[in-house]
């Protein structure tokens, strides 16, 4: 089958003879229509780990939507022709974490979607029906939106509180929309790419700050904001984590959402964190949030045109992975087969 395959660090090719995944008795064969490009795909391309270690060769991508073309003999919930999206994270159901309500931390977890390919065959428990009116293009946002929902859940934001989003890529875009929908009083965006300012403000940001040119804490005070109650870091870099911890107000909750390099170290000013009594959390994948993501997209609560910056072909992907030309301004979605 046709697939975008990573053979090693910075060695990615579009091939037409990659083996199709086997269809297990409990699996659903999906013809992929769209697959989003995730920051972890860039990490893998650069020779780093994604959410899990990488074994070569591997088809990239996991933010997939498409149509069911075959089902295993034990599948009861799906039929050929169903329009679906997929949670790429499988959990065993019987380890300590699964049995204690933390299946995203499963000791035996594995990825079951390699979405930049003609076909995927995930187990039926990882497949979700889509409403007829939700386009497969927009449904490619289900997985990243589900992850964002988990991150915003961890913020435990109350309506009216001030939220600061550090990093305004595709994830920061979705998180801003979720925070706005959840009733944030003021939303501060910290982002060095000036071209993103207008989008952030249009989506509901109260204040857009450039860390290269602005004194962040002074600018926040000058805007009449007495305290940053919640901070969510979306860049996955030591500097974005440092900024998140620095701008957080007293008693704030800070969620480190971005995926950092495995060997990256974030300096922590322990005394300052102690004085501010910070709550520091990390966010990992998307436990039990996919249905909510589908609902938000289906009800038009997410501006998908503002989130999706560019549709590209599989043949365009190697260049995008090398340059990040389009990804620096928004979510890139690969069109595998138009619906």
Image (cartoon, rainbow, N blue to C red):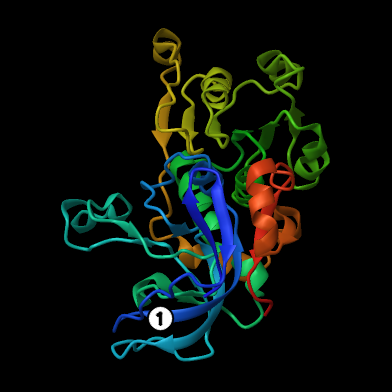
Q: Residue at x 72, y 28 (%)?
A: 192
Q: Residue at x 17, y 56 (%)?
A: 95
SS assignment at label 1 = strand
Q: Is residue 291 above or below residue 253?
A: below
Residue 86 can be seen, yes or no: yes
Choose top left, top right, bottom left or bottom right for residue 323.
Answer: top right
Q: Which residue is mark 1?
A: 28
- Where residue 72 sits in the image (x, y, percent)? 34, 87
Left or right, 165 with respect to 264, comes to right
Residue 141 can be seen, yes or no: no
In the image as oriented, which residue stretches furthest toward the top? Answer: 271
Q: Is residue 289 above or below residue 77?
A: above
Left or right, 316 with respect to 65, comes to right
Left or right, 217 with respect to 262, comes to right
Q: Residue at x 39, y 87 (%)?
A: 71
* Quadrant, the C terminus: bottom right
Residue placed most toward the observer, 99 or 240? 240
Dot 1, how many residues are within 10 Å of its Cα: few (below 14), some (14-19), or many (20+)? many
- Where residue 50 sits in the image (x, y, percent)? 44, 45
- Where residue 310 sits in the image (x, y, percent)? 74, 57
Residue placed most toward the observer, 289 or 18? 18
- Where residue 228 sits in the image (x, y, percent)? 59, 26
Q: Is residue 112 above or below residue 160?
A: below
How many numbered marks are there? 1
């Amino acid at each position: 089958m046709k697939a975008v395959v990573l053979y090693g660090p910075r060695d990615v090719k579009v091939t037409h003879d990659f083996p199709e995944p086997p269809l297990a008795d409990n699996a659903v064969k999906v013809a992929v229509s769209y697959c989003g490009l995730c920051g972890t795909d860039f990490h893998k391309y650069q020779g780093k780990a994604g959410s899990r270690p990488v074994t070569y060769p591997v088809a990239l991508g996991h933010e997939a939507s498409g149509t069911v073309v075959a089902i295993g003999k034990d599948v009861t919930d799906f039929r050929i022709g169903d329009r679906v999206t997929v949670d790429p994270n499988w959990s065993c159901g019987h380890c300590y974490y699964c049995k204690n309500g933390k299946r995203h931390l499963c000791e035996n977890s594995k990825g079951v979607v390699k979405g930049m390919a003609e076909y995927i065959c995930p187990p039926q428990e990882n497949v979700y029906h889509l409403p007829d009116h939700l386009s497969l293009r927009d449904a490619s946002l289900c997985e990243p939106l589900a992850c964002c929902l988990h991150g915003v859940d961890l913020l435990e934001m109350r309506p009216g509180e001030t939220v600061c989003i550090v990093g305004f890529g595709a994830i920061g875009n979705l998180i801003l929309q979720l925070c706005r929908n959840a009733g944030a009083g003021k939303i501060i965006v910290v982002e060095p790419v000036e071209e993103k300012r207008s989008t952030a403000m249009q989506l509901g940001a109260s204040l857009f700050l450039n860390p290269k040119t602005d004194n962040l804490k002074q600018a926040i005070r000058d805007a009449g904001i007495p305290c940053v109650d919640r901070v969510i870091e979306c860049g996955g870099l030591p500097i974005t984590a440092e900024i998140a911890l620095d701008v957080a107000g007293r008693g704030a909750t800070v969620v480190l959402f971005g995926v950092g390099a495995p060997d990256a170290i974030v300096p922590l000013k322990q005394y300052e964190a102690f004085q501010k009594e910070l709550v520091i959390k990390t966010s990992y994948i998307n436990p039990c949030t996919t249905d909510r993501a589908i609902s938000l997209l289906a009800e038009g609560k997410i501006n998908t045109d503002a989130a999706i910056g560019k549709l590209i072909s599989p043949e365009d992907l190697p260049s995008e992975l090398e340059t990040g030309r389009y990804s620096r301004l928004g979510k890139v979605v690969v069109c595998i087969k138009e619906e």
